[in-house]
Amino acid sequence: MLGIIGGTGLTQLANLEITHRKVGRTPYGEPSGALTFGHICDQEVIFLARHGYGHTIPPHEVNYRANLWALKEHGVDRVVSVATVGGIHPELLPGMLVIPDQIIDYTHGRASTYFVGGDKPVTHLDFTFPYCGAMRAALLQAAIDAGIRLRDGGVYGAVQGPRLETAAEINRMERDGADMVGMTGMPEAYLARELDLCYAAVGVVVNYAAGRGSSADGIQMEEIQAVLGESMLQVRHLLEQVVTNDAASACAV
Ligand code: HPA
């Protein structure tokens, strides 16, 4: 079953026919909110708002472990994670969607593994390719089918937040090879790997990163809000197409 983790601007899915909600408890504490069970085109999906349904949980306080654990416990084996990003690469303009293929992790102090405690063996998992190829391919195919333009590939730089970056930090990240910057990509992607979930992300570029383009003199929050609405419409269409393709049946929408 497909699980969808929504970020800023996507706290609910308009095209999801909700059947029920369930508050999940896990050995790692409580997820960001109740799991929302429903159907898109007759396919069952579970939706979870990463920052809570009232958008009150900042990126560094999200219980990533509980979120993914709860999804898995309820039958999810594939996850699409939606997250806003700032564009560093000159081609990543506000309003664009991108399916990243690599990650650089700048976060710290987050609970980033399930393998803790004396009873667990030391475990090092391969993370050379942090996203699941099959889920990425499904997203790219859905974009083609739905006529949605997006960029295939890019390096996601995961920062701690909640503050935005300085211009010098963005310059450094660019030298490192980061194409986009966001606050929630890690440890989410790695925890998904530990749980053997097929996980990929949709980056929604909502602003030029600090010091770039129209953010040369500072990031304008109003600009972000202006971009968010239209971009999330595209994301909804993309997700609907992913699910429709899953069903391999025509969906009258
Ligand atoms: N920096 C970090 N996270 C973000 C940004 C940004 O510029 N835009 C959206 N999420």
Image (tube, grey):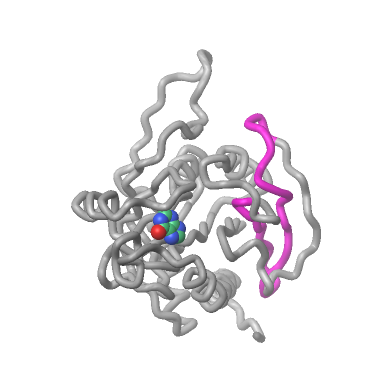
Residue 228: image location, x then y, percent: 53, 71
Residue occupying the point 49% across, 65% down: 221
Direction from residue 177 to residue 199 in the image, left or right:
right
Residue occupying the point 49% across, 69% down: 224
Direction from residue 88 to residue 190 in the image, left or right:
right
> What is the magenta range?
26-51
Residue occupying the point 41% across, 21% down: 122
Q: Which corner quadrant holds the N terminus? A: bottom right
Residue 112: image location, x then y, percent: 47, 34
Asked if residue 138 can be seen in this view, the reply is no
Asked if residue 37 can be seen in this view, the reply is yes
Residue extending farthest to the front is 217
Q: Is residue 34 above or below residue 147?
A: above
Q: Would residue 215 be counted in the magenta stretch? A: no
Q: Nearer the viewer, residue 192 or 6?
A: 6
Q: Would residue 40 be counted in the magenta stretch? A: yes
Q: Nearer the viewer, residue 135 or 29?
A: 29
